Image (cartoon, helix red, strand yellow):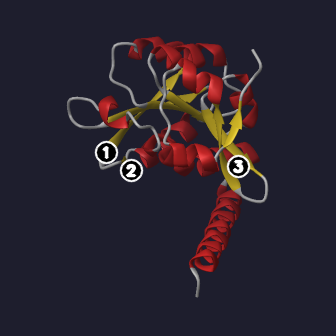
Amino acid sequence: MNMAYSIRILKIIGIMILSMLYALNFCFAESKDETMAWVGLDLYLSILSADEDIAQKKDSLEKLNILVVYNAKEKKAEEMVNYLSEKEVKGFPLNAVITDVESIKNYADKNLAGIFISERNIRDLKVIIDFSISHNLIVFSPFEEHVLSGVTSGMIINDRIVPYININTAKMAKIRIKPFFLRIAEKFKSND
């Protein structure tokens, strides 16, 4: 068996697994948006891993602090916080914290690694984007329109789930994403 054939088989298996997880998650989710948020959590971990400066974003306890931002669905965001708090990125455990948009400013002096947007109808998206740029953070939203509005990263679901990177915001936030990851991601770059 040649290498190209093996890689193709692994990609097909990966797509099948992601599709099954997506379908299974959909059975337990209240809505399509919630399903997208749950699928996005694992992709967000991959995007954080692709941040070339992630090791510098750990706190004094060697943890990566993640904000999970919600608007109305606090209980669902808390479940996502619990899920993320059991994970690690590049060997660093995650410490996920729930917050609303209005409280983000309270984290200005904290060592943060990133922000995850847990629902589509988020108020004041620009506040999150501006905060991420000034603090050099990757923000992830599973909702494509958020990436088009300036969120650093997200996903597109077609025949497979693909990372989606807003190149302009990543540059403004001085985020350095590994070249391999950029090659596999869809990229949005506005003409502004």
Instruction: Residue type at mark 3: give it.
Output: Glu
Mark 1 falls on what kind of element? strand
**Point 56% across, 13% down: residue:** 130
Q: Quadrant of residue 149?
A: top right
Instruction: Residue type at mark 1: give it.
Output: Pro
**Point 38% across, 44% down: residue:** 85
For the C terminus, the quadrant is top right
- Locate residue 21, reporting x and y percent: 63, 64
Is residue 10 placed above or below 33 in the rendered structure? below
Tag 1 and tag 3, C-beta contact below 8 Å: no
**Point 40% across, 31% down: residue:** 113
Mark 3 falls on what kind of element? loop
Q: CA distance from mark 2 to mark 1?
A: 6 Å
Tag 2 and tag 1, C-beta contact below 8 Å: yes
60 left or right of 92 in image: left
Classify 10 Å Cα crowding around label 3: few (below 14), some (14-19), many (20 and above): few
* Earlier-in-chain disc, 1 versus 3: 3
For the N terminus, the quadrant is bottom right
Q: Which residue is most to the bottom?
A: 1
The residue under label 3 is 30
The residue under label 2 is 87
**Point 63% across, 74% down: residue:** 13
